[in-house]
Amino acid sequence: MKFFVDTADVAEIRALAELGMVDGVTTNPSLIAKSGRKMAEVIAEICDITPGPVSAEVTATDYETMLAEGQFLRGIASNVAVKVPLTEAGLRVCKALSSEGTPVNVTLCFSPVQALLAAKAGAAYISPFVGRLDDLAQDGMQLIADIVQIYRNYPHLTTEVLVASVRHPLHMAQAAKLGAHVATLPPAVIRQLIKHPLTDRGLDAFLADWKKTGQSIL
């Protein structure tokens, strides 16, 4: 399973890349706004850090402007994946850009049939938002299960399921069990995956026993 980091914080991306946890990066207008920097500048720097796909999202809603923005973003670096919303205009842009060889990440997916439409439009990735569905007392992970099943029924579809709006480690474990291709996680959630109280307790016990020996490895 591939791990994408959901942030525009370059320092965080560098740190997690050193752990081997960065197969790609996803950004959006909200994350870019938090950085306080120009979008093109941030995307270019992120693309230098990771060879994996870096999702850069359009901000327009009409077809012509959205397409122009997508083409501009794609020109920033060869590993940019253009992110478009799951709207009629977004699907048209997905079809146009993917036909040119540009990988497209279709975002804000909330139903299995939306995911099927994105795949037919040539999306490289579909981003279902599990956490936002959970917030509405709906089962976000059931959406992942449905999309994975539908895609498996049609092997000619090459769209990868990119689980988004991941809120906690349980989301991650469930997505991996279902066979989702990618999950995009905020840096804090990636660090939560590492931590376990029994790991900490065991390490403390080992170190306490070693201290009693009075020895040093070096």
Image (tube, rainbow, N blue to C red):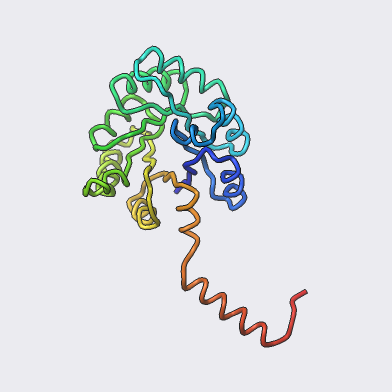
Q: Residue at x 29, y 24 (%)?
A: 87
Q: Residue at x 74, y 83 (%)?
A: 215
Q: Is residue 68 above or below residue 112?
A: above
Residue 128 percent across, percent down from the top left:
32, 39
Q: Is residue 39 left or right of residue 217?
A: left
Residue that protrudes farthest toward the right in the picture: 218
Residue 19 percent across, percent down from the top left:
59, 53
Residue that protrudes farthest toward the top in the picture: 64
Instruction: Please state which of residues 161 and 19 is positioned toward the viewer in this rendering.
Output: 19
Q: Residue at x 57, y 23 (%)?
A: 76
Q: Residue at x 44, y 49 (%)?
A: 1
Q: Quadrant of the C terminus?
A: bottom right
Instruction: Please state which of residues 200 and 24 is positioned toward the viewer in this rendering.
Output: 200
Q: Is residue 169 above or below residue 144?
A: below
Q: Is residue 104 left or right of residue 144?
A: right
Query: Which quadrant holds residue 43?
Result: top right
Q: Is residue 116 above or below residue 182?
A: above
Residue 61 percent across, percent down from the top left:
35, 20
Q: Is residue 75 above or below residue 148?
A: above
Residue 51 percent across, percent down from the top left:
58, 36
Q: How many marks?
A: 0
Q: Is residue 18 left or right of residue 24?
A: right
